[in-house]
Amino acid sequence: MRFADRYLSEKGLQAEIHPFKNIPEAGIIIVIPAFLEKNLHTTLKSLKETYPNNKAVLALVVINHPEQASEEIKMANHAMYHQTVAWMKKNSSPSLSFHAIYYPDMPEKHGGVGLARKKGMDTACALFNQQGNPDGVIVALDADTIVEKNYLQAIEQHFSNNPKSPAANIHFEHILPKEQDSALYLHISQYELHLRYYVEAQKYCTLPFAFHTVGSAFCVKAGVYSREGGMNRKKAGEDFYFLQKILRLGNFSKVKGTTIYPSARTSFRVPFGTGASALKFIQRKEKTLYTYNLQSLIDVKNLTDGIAVLYKTDDSEITNYLNRLAKPLKKYLSMQNFKNKIKEMQTNSASETVFKNRFFTWFNGFRLMRYLNENHPENYQFQPVATEAKSLLELYKFNHQSLEDTVSLLKFYRDLQKDEV
């Protein structure tokens, strides 16, 4: 029995692997969902211009639309499929081959980026399964994104140097619009700063899941992908929910030395995320993007910093620990059955390390976000993202006096997360 047979038969979408019988065995398969995508060929060209790898690479584009799409959209998507196939035939090589899956009329309940990404990633998993290669790397990329020339080499080298890592994310930087006074420029610069501030604030809280979960910027080993139940079918946030499963495994890592560049644009394709947020921001004629109050995350740090002391404690000590926390966090944890959860972790942990791992498997990125969303704005006021980003730098004692505007702050945070600060 091959490593992914059970997953593919029980949870996988039908994997269309018959067109790939005559291609070289790949070490990396890139999956790119594309729905009514004008910039797809720009993305594919940037991949073609990357430096060659030691092992072959396959780029798999899933051209899709939901069944409720208009006839105009369906016709445009169908035309895009044929144009893309023609381009792929001319530009494929043994070292980097391009292939397309046409996935029309996806069911209304699930028709969206999650299902399209799952279709491609399940196909990639099936190809690696056929090769008997659980260490084959499945890469998630979006159809509006440009990659650096060393992109594929950096991914290959990363997993060669980090054989125990199940998955990794990749540094990203949105392409900012040229019109610096435009509404889109205002939004994208602040939105990316929000993403970076949120991850850095999690690091300040010593949370082990403090990584970006961006759909165009992660990769996962095929064996891990199948063992963890594969991609979900969510219409948005599929990347966040999928990576929460992977992060709990530990050894999640970051591909260093390369960057991807997603486009800055509005989008009607998804109910939330970068594009949807930009669309609402512009429609409301807003100037300032608001983010989570830094104090709400400092209060979480007071929970996590000393959590190891609960490894061997009785009921009264757990109660005292809970009572010392900020009221909003105490209330939230109480509603999450905190005391009983801690007792359960104590019973099933043979060491303090195991106890801490169990705690952070429970208090994960999803539970953190629920706490923040349930307490803003009732108990914590949302704040301008530039204000909180500066306040976090003050806690880190970084010199931020020259960082007067959003873009300079964003550049600092970008460099910080590229490990250049």
Image: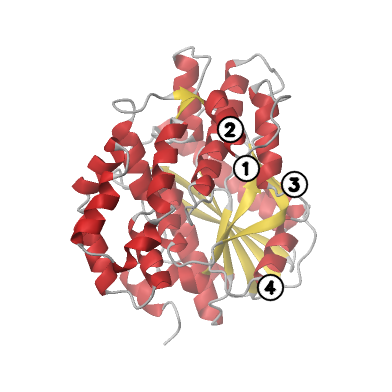
Q: Amino acid at mark 3?
A: Glu
Q: CA distance from mark 2 to mark 4?
A: 31 Å
Location of residue 15 by image quarter: bottom left
Tell me the crowding category of disc 1: few under 14, some 14 to 19, or many 20 or more residues within 10 angstroms, Cα based: many
Q: Quadrant of the C terminus?
A: top right
- Residue 40 - label: 1
The residue at the point 57 percent across, 48 percent down is 216
Q: Nearer the viewer, mark 3 or mark 4?
A: 3
Q: Between residues 239 and 31, which one lies in front from this camera angle?
A: 239
Upstream in the sequence, badge 3 or badge 4?
A: 4
Q: Which residue is mark 4?
A: 160
Which tag is nearer the camera, tag 2 or tag 1?
2
Above or below 71: residue 4: below
- Of mark 2 and mark 1, the one earlier in the sequence is 1
| Residue behind mark 2 | 193
User: Which residue bears the numbered disc 3?
Assistant: 420
Contact? badges 4 and 1 (CB < 8 Å): no
Q: Nearer the viewer, mark 2 or mark 4?
A: 2
